[in-house]
Amino acid sequence: MKAVQYREAGGSPEVVEIPKPVPGPGEVLLKVTAAGVCHSDIAVMSWPADQIPFPLPLTLGHEGAGIVAELGAGVTGVEAGESVAVYGPWGCGRCTKCAAGKENYCLNAATEGIHPPGLGAPGAMAEYMVVDSARHLVPLKDLDPVRTVPLTDAGLTPYHAIKLSLPKLVPGSTAVVIGTGGLGHVGVQLLRAMTAARVIALDVTEEKLELAKRVGAQEAILSDENAPAKVRELTGGVGAEVVLDFVGAPPTTKIAGQCAAVEGDVTIVGLGGGTLGVGFGALPYEVSVTSPYWGSRDEMIEVFDLARDGAVDVHVETFSIDDAPAAYEKLHKGEIMGRAVILPNG
């Protein structure tokens, strides 16, 4: 079968032929209908060889959806032919975090060598993939897998981040979204669906700011050194109660801190390598800074319910599996509006 793999450190994604996998006991084989392309993949492919915590080659794709093709011995809870999406941050299933559905914060994943698909385990960017447990599958039912697959990360991650700050997103509050691409344009929609806050979007391109306004941002301004002053002007000098940085690069984390209000939340979601210092005088009084990871299994179900109600819709650009390397190149250049989705089986 065809698969998109990262084969050696410093290389580029390649389309290769590999054997079709066979599900073992407790595992599920999916015929993949859709696989999302993510900046996280690019981040992984930028690591030096001595920092890659899993063996190569690696089949990419941590956002996956498919049709159940075959069940391993002992599998219950799913049926052949069922349309499902993959919950990506796999855990041990036994620790206190996993018991609460928070496998994204599994206490044993590192010591037991458990990796998400596409980020250590073979991923969804292939004609078939093996999922380690039926508990990592969520039924899609009437949802379109192509438009829904990005929600397994690009929807779940901002949803989890926003839920952390819901008590502060009251009527009259302001939320700033930095970076309105794949995750950010979904974050804008989720803020509008889940809260009464006014949403101010920041990005470096007018095209992405236009997308932010189309999906619900009340204000959209260029993300530059003047952005914090404009945010303060729009908020009467107060600043934003919640700042969500979906870029996470040094320039954006600096802007995030400068936009925050007293007792505000700054949430750094992006993997751009930026940090934000915390200490007396470094930020307005009692600003909380957090850096969450993905989301829980129950939150993924909640995101799908929002999509089913029409509250969130991902802007997608589709590619064949043969064109997956070109999709990564476009993503790296910032030329993808919304989210790129690979269709491994056409």
Image (spheres, rainbow, N blue to C red):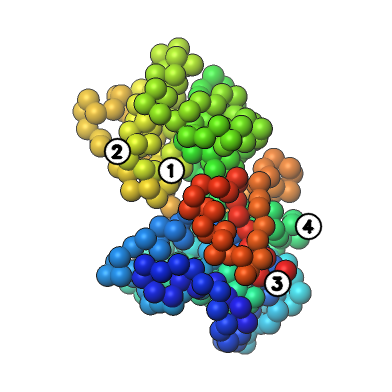
Q: Secondary structure at mark 2?
A: loop
- The residue beneath circle 3 is 345
Indicate which disc residue 247 carries.
1
- Distance from disc 3 to disc 2, alpha carbons, whole Å, reads 43 Å
Q: Is residue 137 left or right of residue 275?
A: right
- Disc 3 vs disc 4: which is toward the camera? 3
Query: Which x, y percent locates residue 6?
Result: 46, 71
Q: Secondary structure at mark 3?
A: loop
- The residue beneath circle 4 is 142
- Distance from disc 3 to disc 1, alpha carbons, whole Å, reads 31 Å
Q: Are marks 3 and 1 in contact (CB under 8 Å)?
A: no
Q: Nearer the viewer, residue 204 or 240?
A: 204
Decide which of tag 3 and tag 2 comes sooner along the chain: 2
Residue type marked 2: Leu
Taking the view exactly as shown, the residue that stands out farthest to the top is 236
Query: Which x, y percent locates residue 182?
Result: 56, 47
- Specify the quadrant of the image occupied by residue 22: bottom right
Decide which of tag 1 and tag 4 comes sooner along the chain: 4
Q: Secondary structure at mark 1?
A: loop
